[in-house]
Structures are given as structure tokens and as C-alpha cells.
Image (cartoon, rainbow, N blue to C red):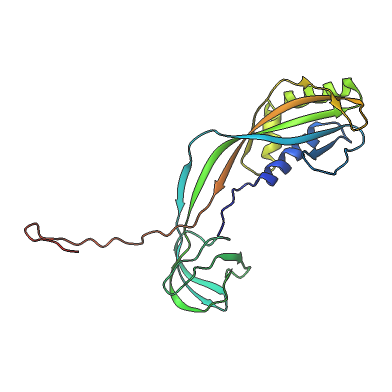
């Protein structure tokens, strides 16, 4: 099973776009950069392109075990007793007689879970634990503010630079429900843009720095108990 960070790049980009649309004047388009064969929007618009990602801190690793008594009928898991933890989508189910280990594809309204494999198992102790690997990352977006009017381009760039360094920007991104926080936006730079028709278009460039706390969740088995035995010191122990 492959791993993927949560929130994903698309989710981060969508949350930023929603915040930018709330900041900019009505009618201004916000589009993704580096899309081939896509014409520029009419009127004023902003192109957002991620230009780098930087690690802010070392990984923060936490564990989340789940042990339960359950049975499986035709790929549907019923947990009759949960010792600790909870069943979650995309978790791998471990247990005696399960090879290969299936994953939980859905939690059903009746509390049962649908597995990725169509198997049947009698009641036994099972587990669905995982690790959470969190990396705080600085994600830097280049915002290209385009307009046919220098004044409008300047005003929009100044607005973005100001709001994304203020608590207002924090609240706009927090509304997405994702672990995203604007760190700062740099000073706008006026960099003219040449169109395909060899016409000069006014453009300001602003770098917007966000912190994204992305989590990758690999499956993990945990020891339920430790059996300790003693070996006499005056005897030679052979495994």
C-alpha cells in the first residue's frame, strides 16, 4: 500500500485559492500555474505556482494502536469488543489467519467496516494500528498578479502581501479546516510579462509562505503483551 501526505498538495492549493478569492476584488480569477495549452483568463487574474517546499522541523512521530475482538463475513468486519483505539478508513487489519492483511475501505452506518478483501474469519483478536509521521513544511507559492492596468495590479499585489502577513489571512486559511497557517508574504515585485502577441502586460509577483503540517500514516503492528522469563545465572543459555 502506498503512502500519501494529508493534507495533499491539491487540498493545500484549493484552500489557498479560496482564501485569495476572498481577498481579491470580485471577478478576479485565480488559476493554477504551469498548465499547458490553457489560455489566460480575460480581465485581471492571479496565477498560483508552488516553487519550493522546505522542512521546518524534524518529524514528529506518534502511535495510534487499535485492538479489537472481531469477525469477518464476506469482507464485512464486525467488531464486538474494542479494547482501545478506533477503526479508521485506510488502516491495515492484522491478525492470525489474515494473509495478506486487508485494509479498511469504509466504515458503514451500522458500525461495521468494509474490507478490501472478500474474506471470512471467525471471531478473534485483531489489530489496526498505525504510526503518524508529521512533518511541518514551509510551502512557498509564487502569486503572479496580472492586469491590463498598472494601478490595479499594484493594489492587488499590495493587498495580498498585507493580508497574508496578518491574522486575517490566518483566519481565512483556518476556515478550510486544514492544518495551514500563513507565515508571511514578501514585498511585491513589478516584473512585466510579455504575451504571445508580444504585448507587455503589467504583472506583480508576490511569494506567499505557508506552513502545512502534513501527516503520513504507515501501518504498524504493536506488541499486546511481553512474556518475561528467567534464566539461571550459573547455566549456559542456548537459544
Front in this rendered view, residue 74 or 42: 42
Q: Where in the figure is residue 39, as x and y percent of width and height?
A: 88, 41
| Residue name at image x 50 percent, y 34 percent | 57
Q: Which quadrant of the structure image shows residue 83?
A: bottom left
153 sits left or right of 96 in the view: right
Q: Where in the figure is residue 75, as x and y percent of width and height?
A: 57, 75
| Residue name at image x 86 percent, y 34 percent | 28
Q: Which quadrant of the structure image shows residue 105?
A: bottom right
Q: Where in the figure is residue 141, as x and y percent of width and height?
A: 70, 33
27 sits left or right of 58 in the view: right
Front in this rendered view, residue 84 or 122: 122
| Residue name at image x 82 percent, y 31 percent | 24
| Residue name at image x 87 percent, y 27 percent | 194
Reply above or below: 42 against 151: below
224 sits left or right of 173 in the view: left
Front in this rendered view, residue 34 or 14: 34
Q: Which quadrant of the structure image shows residue 144?
A: top right
Reply above or below: 129 against 45: below
- The tally of labels here is 0
Q: In the rendered view of the protein, which quadrant contains the N terminus?
A: bottom right
Reply above or below: 214 against 185: below
In the displayed orientation, state which residue is furthest to the left. 234
Q: In the rendered view of the protein, which quadrant contains the C terminus?
A: bottom left
Amino acid at each position: 500500500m502506498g503512502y500519501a501526505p494529508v493534507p495533499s498538495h491539491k487540498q493545500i492549493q484549493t484552500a489557498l485559492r479560496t482564501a485569495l478569492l476572498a481577498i481579491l476584488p470580485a471577478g478576479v480569477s485565480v488559476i493554477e500555474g504551469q498548465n499547458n495549452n490553457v489560455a489566460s483568463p480575460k480581465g485581471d487574474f492571479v496565477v498560483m505556482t508552488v516553487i519550493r517546499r522546505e522542512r521546518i522541523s524534524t518529524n514528529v512521530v506518534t502511535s495510534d494502536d487499535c485492538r479489537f475482538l472481531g469477525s469477518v463475513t464476506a469482507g464485512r468486519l464486525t467488531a464486538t469488543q474494542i479494547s482501545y483505539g478506533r477503526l479508521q478508513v485506510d488502516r491495515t487489519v492484522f491478525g492470525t489467519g489474515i494473509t495478506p492483511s486487508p485494509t479498511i475501505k469504509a466504515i458503514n452506518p451500522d458500525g461495521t467496516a468494509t474490507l478490501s478483501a472478500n474474506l471470512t474469519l471467525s471471531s478473534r483478536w485483531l489489530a489496526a494500528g498505525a504510526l503518524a509521521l508529521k512533518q511541518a513544511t514551509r510551502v512557498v507559492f509564487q502569486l503572479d498578479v496580472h492586469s491590463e492596468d498598472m494601478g490595479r495590479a499594484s493594489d492587488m499585489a499590495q493587498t495580498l502581501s498585507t493580508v497574508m502577513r496578518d491574522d486575517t489571512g490566518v483566519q481565512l486559511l483556518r476556515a478550510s479546516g486544514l492544518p495551514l497557517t500563513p507565515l508571511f508574504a514578501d514585498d511585491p515585485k513589478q516584473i512585466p510579462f510579455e504575451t504571445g502577441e508580444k504585448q507587455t502586460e503589467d504583472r506583480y509577483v508576490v511569494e506567499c509562505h505557508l506552513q502545512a503540517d502534513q501527516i503520513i500514516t504507515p501501518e504498524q503492528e504493536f506488541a499486546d503483551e511481553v512474556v518475561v522469563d528467567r534464566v539461571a545465572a550459573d547455566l549456559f543459555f542456548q537459544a
